[in-house]
Amino acid sequence: MDLTLTPELAAFRDEVRTFLAAHEGEHEGGAPKDPKAWQKTLIAHGYAARTIPKAYGGYGAQPDILKSRIIAEEFIAASAPRGMSGQGIAMLVPTLLEVGSEEQKTRWIPPTLSGEILWCQGYSEPGAGSDLANLQTRAVEDGDDFVISGSKIWTSTAMQAQMMFCLVRTEPLAAKHEGISYLLFPMSTPGIEVRPLKTMTGQAEFNEVFFTDVRVPKANVVGGRGRGWFVANTTLKHERGMLGDPNATEARLKALAEVMTTERVDGERIIDNPIFRDRLMQLQARVLSMKFNGLRTLTDDTAGLARMIVKLQGCELNHQLAALAIDALGELGILYQDGPHLRAKGRWQWNYMFDLGLIIGGGTAQIQKNIISERGLGMPREPKVVEA
Amino acid sequence: MRFALSEDQTLLQDSVNRTLADLVPLERVRRFADGDQATAPDIWAGLADLGLPGLMIPEEHGGLGLGMVEAALAAEALGRVTAPTPFLGSGVLAPLALTLAGTAEQRARWLPKLASGEATAGAAISEGVAGARDGAGVTAGSGRLNGKALFALDAASADLLIVGDRAGGLNLALTASRTQPMPGIDATRPLWELTFEDAPAQALASNMALERLRDAAWIVLAADTLGAAQGMLDKAVAYAKERKQFGRTIGSFQAVKHLCAEMAAELEPARALVWYAAYAFDHVPEEAALMAAHAKAHTSEIGRFIARTATEVHGGVGMTDLLGLHYAFKRIGQNRQLLGGPERVREIAARLQGLAA
């Protein structure tokens, strides 16, 4: 255990702070005033797309988890927005870097990083959720093209996205995991229809996407025909790293403590109620545990199990933080639409509802528990049902 | 920066675990718990070969001169096998009290003997940390102690006692006027009621020493619970892989394996919290008390969950004396209440941040 920073890292922290102070005026309320310009500035200084090679529009630094951690901490402390996220940057780019062809990397990574191209992910289907490999969207060979028919669900940003990375079944006779290919295509391709999927939050954070004879060149396959399942697993690994991120949890605790120390009922601060105070302390201990667990996963080779539990515990903890904020607000916690008494634009209720989706999505809590017990604790798998 | 055990720390952990596997098999725990001996000198002597009694004692006084991270690792190993030892009182609290607040003469007289295991020490700080019950409390004055101290640690046949008084000070006494057992759930670590009637004592110098002792005790109890809970989880997983019902090992049922996953998911982050609290005790003074409080309260909560869940995974046999699972169950239960239950400790955590009056 040695948590002191080397002089190089201490200097790096100062550098990040100096940058943030100099660019304070370029964001407001946690959002950049000009998202594309902010993204460009961040990449130029190495605070976004940090380890992506310069040739593909990144900053080109060597991976250094501690520097990445320092950047995250300082951006939270300054309430400064991070670079663009979204599934293209978080999932497609790392996947292309690992398994994409040179032509695919050069063509797709730079405009994705700069925010010119927004992507959506076509994985889940109505009949293929936790059992993703059961997906049925078909891509039939026709000359130099595949012709796609079927549908996808839970597709975030499908209305805005220009491109989709998508899993389709190209080899109907192959075994379940071996008949899938990973395809890239424009959302403007004829035969694609997007229908917004309204959720309990009242908004449509997801969509359904329907394909009717959608023609896509075979050259758009990433990682080889029939290899899509393995390519997708590269991507899922990146998604799970994103869900349950302890930095985001820490920021939420900070906002919750703010609510409890400023809001008053009958003139008394919420924090002065011993029951609420105790609940806050219980969650603070959990947030600290996940923060140190996160630090450990960055630097400890023996932290395999510690890494596996992040999605399960982190998403649950975020949900509990939102729940406590709603409870602390009392009747005010009900308010959700614009109005004179609304707090934080109704985001606590929104988080409480939407986060349930994060507990379910990206591998449900129950799938996570299968992974932890089977891969982490070496427990036996559920026997397969013999199909009649 | 590295949030991981160093090579030396890993070696220490491994050698303590190995030694304990030989010294403290379940049979030895059972013999201690069922017997009428209040101490297990064979175990303490065996651990003295590793230097454990003097782990935190400066090298100039014959100890290993190590810090709280190492003490937490040792406590975790002791908790894992529910070892009956005076580690908290004799290995941690007394050396710390003497180092922080003892005179040169007191240090020279006691630390080498504690380090070798030749002498042991007890500690009575419950009233100042967990609050006074049943009229307990010790008054110090003119070199004498008067009153009662409850829930004293490791006081059986101790050669010296560290005693907290009503004014928040610490005193060094050689013996109490009376030492009576307070039989509790955890027979592996007996607790004592000490009565002082004009008992001679020397006052220790520093006023802040009681807070440091409290933080150290919280971290050691947290690490002990972590170890006991890890031991229970390991046993539950092993049992679920072995036991068959309906023609399958019960560990292949999701109803059972998900319980194990939940235990692991609670335990792993708690380990990082305990490590950090121990690190902060030595290196980050401004965070030390808060982290110790959170480590104590949080391991109490997840410890309770794991103790009952691991027992449940074992089915009926988990309830019996046969597997000895209950020793860890009770140890976790005792650690939870000892020196402040989670509600009291969290209130102190809030106060430390200015969130409570």
Image: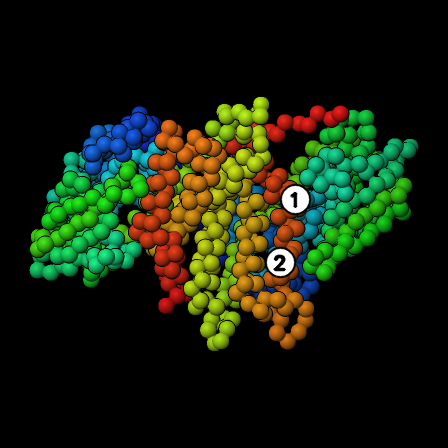
- A166 vs B213: above or below: above
Q: Which residue is mark 2?
A: A351
Q: Is residue B286 above or below residue A361?
A: below
Above or below, B209 relative to B56: below
Q: Amino acid at mark 1?
A: Gly
Give the CA separation, mark 2 to mark 1: 17 Å
Does residue A226 appear in the picture of this structure? no
- Which residue occupies the extreme right position in the image? A143
Quarter of the image with the N terminus of chain B in it: top left
What chain is tagged by disc 1? Answer: A
* Label pair 2/1, CB-CB below 8 angstroms: no
**Which residue is more in the foreground, A257 or A1?**
A257
**In this view of the protein, which residue sits in the foreground, A5 or B29?**
B29
Residue at x-position 38% and y-position 60%: B347
User: For mark 1, does the 10 Å Cα neighbourhood hold few (<14), some (14 to 19), or many (20 or more) residues?
Assistant: many
Q: Which residue is mark 1?
A: A362
Report x, y in % for residue B49.
Answer: 24, 30
Q: For numbered disc 1, what is the local secondary structure?
A: loop
* Residue depicted at 8% across the width and 60% down the height: B142
